[in-house]
Amino acid sequence: MRRGLVHVLAWLLATAAATTLSWWGVHTVMAGTAYDPPRAVPISAAEAAAHATARPPAPPAPTPTPTPTPRRTSAPPSPTPTRTAPTPTVNPTPPAPTTPSGDVKAYDTGGGRAVFDLGPVSATLVSATPGTGWSMQVFKTETWIRVEFSRSTDRVTVFCDWHDGPPHVDVQTY
């Protein structure tokens, strides 16, 4: 009887130690990596037009990142510490400004709002914002963009295509 109790206690202790060590390892690796996906911010048609015609600012020059200080762990330190040299500062060439068509149109639906910049031969999605309680997915190819808003069994699709001519937008409710 005593021998069986010792075995059970040893098994419980080993299981608790393994679970704690596994949790600590996963928690350490995942710390700082899990986040909520960003949500689209609604903008008015006037703001979308202002953003579409505004010239983007030049990106700042990259700065060298400092070498992080090592964290204390229970493992012994590495026998050969390594240090990386900071990368030299490079002045990147600013991207060529894009020429918007200026025909920015918003499509308000029961599931949310989709804003497109409609050009003569193509279109771009300016923003898409789901309504309260709705979720959203965006699908893009070289000849069409589809914004799908969904909530339980309801679905609203805003479809913009330009493969047969100038961009055309259809809104469908399912």
Image (cartoon, rainbow, N blue to C red):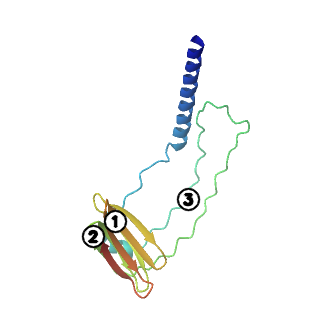
Question: Looking at the image, which is closer to me, 170 or 90?
Answer: 170
- Which amino acid, by three-letter code, is at mark 3? Pro
- Residue 161, located in which quarter of the rendered image? bottom left
Find the distance from the CA under tag 1 to the CA under tag 2.
Answer: 9 Å
Looking at the picture, how far across and down is residue 18, in whole percent?
Answer: 57, 30
**Badges 1 and 2: C-beta atoms under 8 Å apart?**
yes
Question: Looking at the image, which is closer to me, 125 or 82?
Answer: 125
- Which amino acid, by three-letter code, is at mark 1? Phe
Q: Please report whichever mark, 2 or 3, sits nearer to the chain's N-terminal start.
A: 3
Number of numbered discs visible in the structure rendering = 3
Residue 54 visible here: no
Find the distance from the CA under tag 2 to the CA under tag 3.
Answer: 41 Å
Looking at the picture, how far across and down is residue 103, in whole percent?
Answer: 34, 81
Q: Who's the residue at 50% across and 47% down the image? A: 33
Q: Crowdedness of circle 2 by 10 Å Cα count: few (<14), some, many (20+)?
A: some
- Which amino acid, by three-letter code, is at mark 2? Thr
Looking at the picture, how far across and down is residue 80, in whole percent?
Answer: 73, 39
Give the residue number, with chain letter if any, for mark 1: 149
Give the residue number, with chain letter if any, for mark 3: 62
Observer-side mark, 1 or 3, equals 1
Q: Please report whichever mark, 1 or 3, sits nearer to the chain's N-terminal start.
A: 3
- For label 1, the SS is strand
Residue 124 visible here: yes
* Picture quarter with the C terminus: bottom left
Horizontal side of residue 100 vs 91, given as left or right: left
Q: Crowdedness of circle 1 by 10 Å Cα count: few (<14), some, many (20+)?
A: many
| Name of the residue lying farthest toward the right | 80
Q: Who's the residue at 56% across and 35% down the image? A: 22
Give the residue number, with chain letter if any, for mark 2: 109
